[in-house]
Image (cartoon, rainbow, N blue to C red):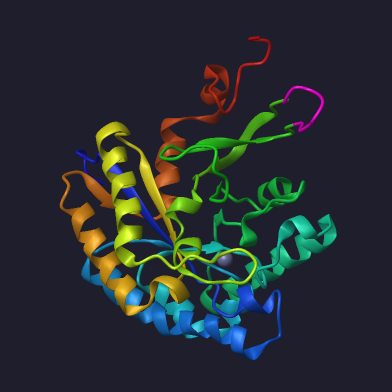
Amino acid sequence: MTDDRRLSVCLSFDFDATSVWISSTDNLAMISRGEFGAVAVPRLLDLLRRREALATFFIPGHTALAYPDLVRAIDASGHEIGHHGWVHENPAELDRRAETEVFRRGLGALAEVAGVTPTGFRSPAGDYSENTIEILLEHGFRYDSTFSGSDFHPYYVRRGDKVSKTEAYEFGEPCELVEMPISWMLDDFPLFEFEVGWSYSQHPPSHVREIWQKEFDWAYENEAGGAVTIIMHPQVIGRGSRLTMLDELIQYMASHQGVVFESLGAYQERWRAANPLAEYRRRGSIHAPLRGSG
Ligand SMILES: [Zn+2]
């Protein structure tokens, strides 16, 4: 923790492996796309070690059981492990009982394989059900990294928002869960991968670097104290040309004074300490408007 910290970079890797495909198909050719993620993880661990960068890996329980040695290697390298479902199911498609069950199954697998109890969650498929916030709080989770309500600064997640097409939006109360926000623009999957039905672009690494680097540059100039969160998937970023791009980008970022590579969990704990919930509620913000303030 340096005093001259100016901007944090939170590299995050969703180690979905086969689970992301198994959740929707039993086609072995499709599933093999996920197997490549296991090939890529040692490459990423090596790159992160060389650049002395700590990161966060979100891992479904199903993946942890399939590749226990890799999960233990991630943990042993000092990276954070976060919760990413059981078999990459979409919480929005589950009732509360089923969502709780797969949530606990995912937790159980991470504990069994690596003795890890995560404090952070990223929703598989990027969706939330009406019960997800409560389930996270019930299980003592400290933060989520699924929403996109901000870019470089966290905020407290609200519970009890009322969404209506006919009435004004009603904001709920901020709760103990910190949001480490994300953007699809900073996600490797839609930028690089082909998948029938939703993703047809396969950009060259130089295009992706341009987007990610310019977001970093803007944040460095304008959002001191913030965090740039990048979402990657070992099965996507682990290809040679993309790994080279990532390595060069990390070196570019590291050449800026006061840039720190740290886990989402570490950043949010510091932010939480500097922004106690009670004070945050009193102060009000775009994410938590003061009640009765009109
Ligand atoms: Zn995922």
Answer with left or right where residue 222 lies relative to residue 285: left
**Where does the image place residue 189, in percent across and percent down from the top left?**
49, 65
In front of the other: 175 or 27:
27
Q: In the image, what residue occupies the spot 43% across and 35% down? A: 273
The residue shown at (56%, 18%) is 282
In this view, the residue farthest toward the front is 200
Looking at the figure, which quarter contains the C terminus? top right
Give the overall secondary structure of the magenta segment: loop
The residue that appears at 38% across and 61% down in the rendered structure is: 55
Residue drawn 20% across and 60% down? 251
Question: Residue 163: within the magenta?
Answer: yes
The answer to whether residue 10 is left or right of residue 132 is left
Q: In the rendered structure, which segment of residues is drawn in magenta?
A: 162-169
Q: In which quarter of the image is residue 112?
A: bottom right
Task: Answer above or below: position of 244 versus 271.
Answer: below
Residue 269: x %, y % from top left: 44, 44
Nearer the observer, 30 or 111: 30
Ligand 1 visible in quadrant: bottom right
* Res. 255 in view: yes
Judge whether residue 67 can be spotted in this image.
no
Q: Is residue 265 magenta?
A: no
> Measured from the top left, where is residue 115 in percent x and y?
53, 72
| Total numbered badges shown on the rendered structure | 0
Residue 291 in the image: above or below residue 146: above
- Above or below, comparing residue 257 to residue 196 in the picture: above
